[in-house]
Amino acid sequence: MGMLHSGQWCSHETASHDGVYRRPGSAIVGRTIAKYASNIAMEPGRCWLIGSSSCPWSHRAMLVRTLRSIRGSVPLHLAHGARIEGYALDGGVPWRIPGSDRTARHMHELYTVHDPEFTGRVTVPILWDGKTQTILSNDSANIVQILDAVPQTDTDFTLRPDNLARRIDEANDGIHRGLNNAVYQAGFAQSQAAYDTAVATVFQTLDSLEERLSLSRFYFGNRLTETDMRLFPTLVRFDAIYAILFKCCLRRLVDYENLWAYARDLYGWRGIESTVDFRQMREASYLADSSDKNPVVAIAPDIDWRAPHDRSRLGAPFVTARTGTPLRIDPATLEVAHPSA
């Protein structure tokens, strides 16, 4: 991935200790969530979401941006291209930094615009404020909460209802440790013991989720929440990337009847398919995340993400109004039926 030391790019990054991959934390976390969310609503186009189609942490922010119908307020730019100095912003050609006349080729240049002496990892996603020329946050969990808090006039709902916030945080933490990050601990393990431990954790987590989702349409019953946005990006990459490249091959997603149907259910919601770029995911992962730098991209699994899922048998889907009231939602249109309707 690479990092900056006092504003200078360094391609070397140490994230493995005793054969175990340990993901460093994010350096920039926006504390004033309500203020940032208000700025986005009042000044559409001021704040940009900059991520990568290959990155599951970017994907969760893209999902919230899509489901909350704020794409018109928060422009999206997807970094892409060969990672010569970390993420290329626009295939290696100069890209105009939002809110300025300056251009940049690499993601790390945005970090040094934010802070010329920045030291830390250069990651995606970031929430960029074009007005102040700063990174509001490079922490995906924080970005998700900012985007979720953006007020809407017509279909204002939250994926983080107050009465579930503590349980959502607990579930998110468990899914992160057991699946989101564990697949990378398996893929980047530098010892057999570290790999064996990580893979066991991955499939224990998947087995538990399979049981839970046999009785529940979403993680928390019939209400779509932030936790589902944390889970889907890993599931959608599992068979094409993690099972092959990261050797998480005990079972595939398609071998889990309920998890596989759950993932297809989410994939079918309006706008979600457009956030999934299998080609970019696979090419970036196989060419950038492979430890042996083998220039071969594995063929895509022959599976049908549009196949019927029959999850409606578990009940109609709901989201939550900011007042806490459950709102029935149509996945095909994202229109909500208010209680008086």
Image (cartoon, grey):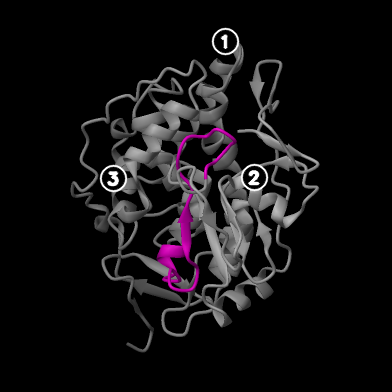
Q: Nearer the viewer, mark 2 or mark 3?
A: 2
Give the total of numbered labels: 3
Rendered residue at 47%/71% (across/down): 320
Disc number at residue 135?
A: none
- The part of the chain drawn in magenta is 65-88
Quick check: can you spot residue 227? no
Mark sitting earlier along the chain (3/1): 1
Q: Are marks 2 and 3 in contact (CB under 8 Å)?
A: no
What residue does disc 3 label? Answer: 261
Magenta part, dominant SS = loop
Residue 34 sits inside the magenta stretch: no
Rendered residue at 34%/34% (across/down): 253
- Assign a secondary structure to mark 2: helix
Give the side of residue 169 with respect to residue 199, left or right. right
Quick check: can you spot residue 293? yes
Mark sitting earlier along the chain (1/2): 2
Mark sitting earlier along the chain (2/3): 2
Seen in the picture, residue 194 relative to 335 is either above or below; the reply is: above
Seen in the picture, residue 93 relative to 299 is either above or below; the reply is: below
